[in-house]
Image: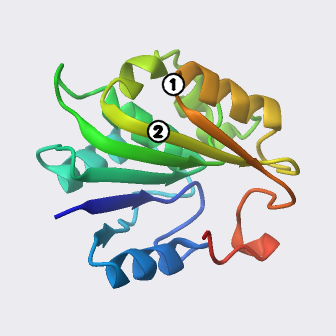
Amino acid sequence: MKRVIIIHGWEANPNSEWLPWLKKSLEDKGIEAIVPAMPNPDFPIEKEWVETISQIVGTPNTDTYFVGHSLGCIATVRYLLTLSDGDMLGGALFVAGFSGNISIPELEEFYSMEKDVREGRKHLLKCTMIYSDNDEDVSIEKSEEFKNHLGDTKGVLVLGKGHFSEYEGIIELP
C-alpha cells in the first residue's frame, strides 16, 4: 500500500496550512497519509526531527513518499541522508523548500551545516519542487538553489501563492 508522509514546517503542526486537506485527499484515494507532529516546531532540533521521521518510516520502500513544506523539505532531505545505499523511496514533493541562510535564527542548525543534498536525492525515484514567485519567507533564488542542489528534480514555479501558508489563504494544494 502506498503511503505518504507529510512533514510540516517551522512553527506549524499537522493541522496547519493545507496539510489536513492533503491528508484527506490522499485517504479518499486509498493512500495512507501520515502527518506527524514534529517535535519542538518553534525551536526545531535537526536530530529530533530526523529521528521522528525515521521512526515513522520504519523500513523504507518504493511505496513510501514524502511531502515536505518549507523546513519539512530540509528535514526530509536530512532523513534521506541517513539511508543506506540501495534504500529507495517512491518520491518526494517539496513545497517552498530552500537552501542556505534565510535569516531565521531558530532554523540555523538546519542550514548552517553543509550537507550534500544530492546524496539524499539518490534515494528518491521521483522528485518535484513547487515554489512561488512571491514567497516573502523563501526567495525564488533560495528555492531554485535547493532544487538545483537536489539535481534531477522537476521545478514548478507558481504565481501568487506566497509561502503556501494558511495566513496567505492557502488551505488546499491541488
Label 1 environment density (alpha carbons within 10 Å; few <14, some 14–19, many ≥20): some
SS under mark 2: strand
Foreground: 154 or 19?
154
Indicate which disc residue 152 carries.
Answer: 1
Q: Position of residue 173 (x, y in %)?
A: 62, 69
Report if residue 155 is visible in the image: yes
Q: Is residue 7 above or below residue 138?
A: below
Mark 1 touches mark 2? (CB < 8 Å): yes
Report if residue 100 is visible in the image: no
Q: Is residue 93 above or below residue 150?
A: below
Label 2 environment density (alpha carbons within 10 Å; few <14, some 14–19, many ≥20): many
Indicate which disc residue 124 carries.
Answer: none
- For this view, does 93 lie left or right of residue 64? right
Callout 2, which amino acid? Cys
Foreground: 121 or 97?
121
State the quadrant of the N terminus.
bottom left
Q: Position of residue 60 (x, y in %)?
A: 17, 43
Q: CA distance from mark 1 to mark 2?
A: 7 Å
Residue lying at 31% horizontally and 68% vertically, measured from the top left: 34
Residue lying at 56% horizontally and 46% vertically, measured from the top left: 71
Q: Is residue 78 above or below residue 50?
A: above
Residue lying at 77% horizontally and 35% vertically, measured from the top left: 103
Foreground: 125 or 42?
125
Q: Is residue 26 above or below residue 122?
A: below
Residue lying at 50% horizontally and 59% vertically, measured from the top left: 8
Q: Earlier in the sequence, mark 1 or mark 2?
A: 2
Would you name the residue on which mark 2 appears? 127
